[in-house]
Image (cartoon, helix red, strand yellow):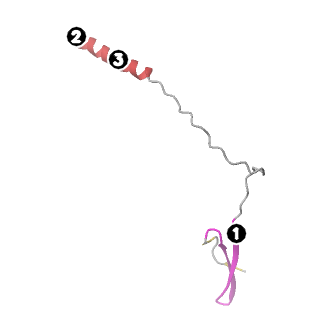
Amino acid sequence: MDKGRRGVRCVIIGVLLSLAFSVNVQAAELPMASLPDDGGSHEAEIMSEKTMWRYRTYKGVLQKRLWSITYKRWKTKWINC
């Protein structure tokens, strides 16, 4: 490789490196949304899933299965009682 190409290559690499290290990244500071003050407690409310047992008689055997009222789906398979 001749000296001319090597010099051009060094200049290009130097320019690219200087651009890469000179880029400044700043985080934008956004205003926080304010919530209305209701004067009450600001604790999280715990919500539980609502379920109920469903029963059936299958081939003379009483069985039960847990149904999620909240998510409208079965939680278990049929279980003999």
Q: Position of residue 54 (x, y in %)?
A: 68, 80
> Pointer 2: residues within 10 angstroms few (<14), some, or many (20+)?
few
Q: Is residue 17 magenta?
A: no
Q: Is residue 68 magenta?
A: yes
Residue that mark 2 sits on:
4
Of the numbered discs 3 and 2, the one sitting upstream in the chain is 2
For the point 73% across and 48% down, the residue is 37
Across and down, in percent, residue 28 comes to 53, 33
For disc 3, the neighbor class at 10 Å (few under 14, some 14 to 19, many from 20) is few
> Does 4 sit left or right of 12 as displayed?
left
Amino acid type of the residue that numbered disc 2 sits on in the rendered structure: Gly
For residue 52, which quarter of the picture?
bottom right
Quick one: label 2 or label 1, which is nearer the N terminus? 2
| Mark in the foreground, 2 or 1 | 1
Range drawn in magenta: 49-71
Q: Amino acid at mark 3?
A: Val
Chief SS of the magenta region: strand
Residue bearing the label numbered 1: 50
State which mark lies toward you, 3 or 2.
3
Total marks placed? 3
Q: CA distance from mark 1 to mark 3?
A: 65 Å
Q: Indicate which disc, 1 or 3, sits on the residue closer to the N terminus.
A: 3
Label 3 residue SS: helix
Write down the residue under mark 3: 15
